[in-house]
Amino acid sequence: MTNEEARQKVQQVMEALFDPNVTAEEVGSYFNPRYVQDANGVVLDHKGFVDHARALKSTLKSGKVRIDKMFVDGQVMVSVHYVDAVKQDDSQLTMKVIACFEVDENGLFINTDELTHLVQGDAADRDLGSRT
């Protein structure tokens, strides 16, 4: 996988995550049923991730992802990206995410290890990287 392909893959799933017209279950279709995510020490399986997607969709009105850096080694992608989001109450936040994604042979995400940092916004939203 090239850096550009990886960038497009991550961008695509993030756009689905923040698109109010895409359900949490549809977002889950980008992920292997055996998916595991560790976000700031909180471990979620596939069901937990779909719950996380649902929580983000109920908390956020919109979001945009800016990928700053992308590194690829085979089926592993490492990104540094920023999420600029607007909450349902119209307040804004920015998160910095450092994530290591692994995809399976079918291109589905199977593992994510990430650290998420609230750059701007309400301190109560520090858990958005793993909120369910």
Image: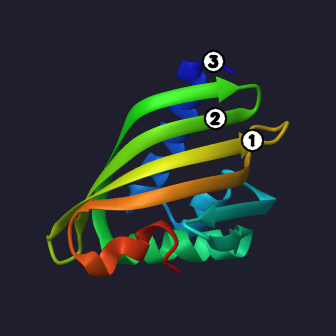
Q: Are marks 2 and 1 in contact (CB under 8 Å)?
A: yes
Label 2 environment density (alpha carbons within 10 Å; few <14, some 14–19, many ≥20): many
Whole-percent x, y for residue 40 in the image: 54, 66
Give the distance between the C-alpha atoms of the residues marked 1 and 3, in whole angstroms.
13 Å
**Which residue is at 36% across, 73% downward?**
126
Residue 81 location, quadrant: top left
Mark 3 lies on a secondary structure that is loop
Label 3 environment density (alpha carbons within 10 Å; few <14, some 14–19, many ≥20): some
Is 90 displayed left or right of 32 in the figure? left
- In this picture the colour scheme is rainbow
Tag nearer the camera, 3 or 2: 2
Residue under pointer 1 = 103
**Which residue is at 73% across, 70% downward?**
45
Q: Are marks 1 and 3 in contact (CB under 8 Å)?
A: no
Give the distance between the C-alpha atoms of the residues marked 2 and 1, in whole angstroms.
8 Å
Q: Amino acid at mark 1?
A: Val
Q: Residue furthest left?
A: 90
Is 57 displayed left or right of 94 in the figure? right
Along the viewing direction, whichever of 74 and 107 lies nearer the viewer: 74
Q: Amino acid at mark 2?
A: Met
Mark 1 lies on a secondary structure that is strand
Sequence-wise, the earlier of marks 1 and 3 is 3
Quadrant where the N terminus sits is top right
Q: Amino acid at mark 3?
A: Thr
Query: With respect to residue 5, does 110 lie above or below?
Result: below
**Which residue is at 24% across, 70% downward?**
87
Mark 2 lies on a secondary structure that is strand
Residue under pointer 2 = 77
Sequence-wise, the earlier of marks 3 and 2 is 3
Residue under pointer 3 = 2
Is 81 displayed left or right of 62 in the figure? right
Query: With respect to residue 103, does 57 lie above or below?
Result: below
